Image (spheres, grey):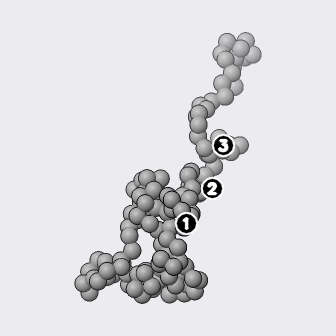
């Protein structure tokens, strides 16, 4: 600090701005460390009341309640339901299905295969 000891002793020592209740830790330089993990984790359950995911027998993927919970925890997300019905060729939904099917071509697990069946890939 600039100034003499006498000048500096007139002011209280400050630790800087301390933010209460912030879930991220502070690094040595004072920055917040965000490891990219969400603040609240969505319960990944496929059985029982309040489940957010469908079991592989039911076609895998998220339930409507699961999508709503995810959107509540991640405002601004554009998560939408799978394209399961008949669609007009060239429509936005048809393009979305085509994109998903191309992306998920290599999925070989039970859940992956179930999800592809649900999307009619």
How far separated are the C-alphas under marks 3 and 2? 12 Å
Q: Where is residue 106 in the image (x, y as percent from the top left)?
A: 54, 87
* Residue 90 x/y as whole percent: 27, 84
Asked whether, in this view, residue 46 is left or right of residue 85, the answer is right
Say which residue appears at 26% left-offset and 87% top-offset: 89
Badge 2 local density, few (<14 within 10 Å), some, or many (20+)? few
* Corner quadrant of residue 26: top right
Label 1 Cα crowd, 10 Å radius (few <14 / some 14-19 / many 20+) = few
* Mark 2: secondary structure: loop
Q: Is residue 19 left or right of residue 50?
A: right
Residue 47 - label = 1
Residue 90 in sight from this viewpoint: no
Q: Residue 26 carries which label?
A: 3
Is disc 3 placed on a helix, strand or loop? strand
| Whether residue 80 is situated above or below residue 14 in the rendered picture | below
Residue pictured at 59% horizontal, 33% vertical: 20
**Dot placed on the residue nearer the N-terminal end, 3 or 2:** 3
Above or below 55: residue 117: below
Identify which residue, 36 or 114, lies in the foreground. 114
Number of marks present in the image shown: 3
**Residue placed under numbered mark 2 in the picture:** 35
Seen at 50% across and 82% down, the residue is 114
On residue 93, the disc is none
**Residue that protrudes farthest toward the front in the picture:** 48
Quadrant where the image shows the C terminus:
bottom left
Q: Does the rendering let one see residue 79?
A: yes
């Amino acid at each position: 600090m600039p100034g003499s000891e006498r000048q500096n002793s007139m002011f209280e020592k400050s630790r800087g701005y301390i933010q209460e209740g912030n879930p991220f830790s502070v690094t040595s330089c004072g920055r917040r460390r965000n490891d990219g993990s969400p603040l609240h984790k969505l319960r990944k359950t496929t059985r029982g009341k309040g489940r957010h995911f469908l079991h592989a027998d039911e076609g895998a993927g998220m339930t409507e309640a699961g999508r709503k919970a995810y959107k509540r925890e991640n405002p601004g997300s554009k998560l939408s339901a799978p394209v399961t019905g008949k669609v007009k060729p060239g429509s936005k939904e048809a393009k979305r299905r085509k994109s998903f099917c191309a992306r998920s071509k290599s999925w070989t697990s039970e859940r992956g295969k179930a999800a592809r069946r649900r999307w009619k890939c």
